[in-house]
Amino acid sequence: MICFLRIGLVTNGRAFFSAMQAYAGTMTETVTQGDAQSAFLAAALDAEAVFRMA
């Protein structure tokens, strides 16, 4: 489980785009949930969001 403590609004960048593609891929079952989670974590790191793994 991931708990976001501070989130900035990010709507561009390579990591954000990859996360959106991964999300779409989970809808069509072409991307695993684990891969999508990794893409979203990469986007969160790119956005300098503060989070902790629980």
Image (tube, rainbow, N blue to C red):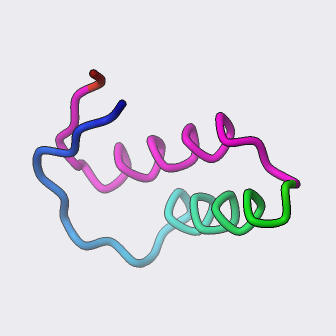
Q: Nearer the viewer, residue 8 or 30?
A: 30
Q: Is residue 48 above or below residue 17?
A: above
Residue at left offset 22%, top offset 28%:
52
Q: Is residue 7 above or below residue 40?
A: below
Quadrant that contains the N terminus:
top left
Residue at left offset 88%, top offset 54%:
30
Image position, residue 34 (x, y; %): 65, 34
Image position, residue 19 (x, y; %): 57, 59
Image position, residue 49 (x, y; %): 22, 49
Q: Quadrant of residue 33?
A: top right
Identity of the residue furthest to the top in this view: 54
On screen, residue 12 versus residue 44, left or right, reads: right
Magenta span includes 29: no
Residue at left offset 56%, top offset 38%:
38
Count of marks placed on residues: 0
Q: Which residues are magenta?
A: 30-52
Q: Nearer the viewer, residue 12 or 2?
A: 2
Q: Nearer the viewer, residue 34 or 21?
A: 34
Q: Quadrant of residue 45?
A: top left
Identity of the residue furthest to the left in this view: 6
Q: Is residue 31 above or below residue 21?
A: above
On screen, residue 54 versus residue 8, left or right, reads: right
On screen, residue 20 versus residue 1, left or right, reads: right
Give the dominant element type of the magenta stretch: helix, strand or loop: helix
On screen, residue 21 versus residue 13, left or right, reads: right
Residue at left offset 77%, top offset 61%:
25
Quadrant that contains the C terminus:
top left
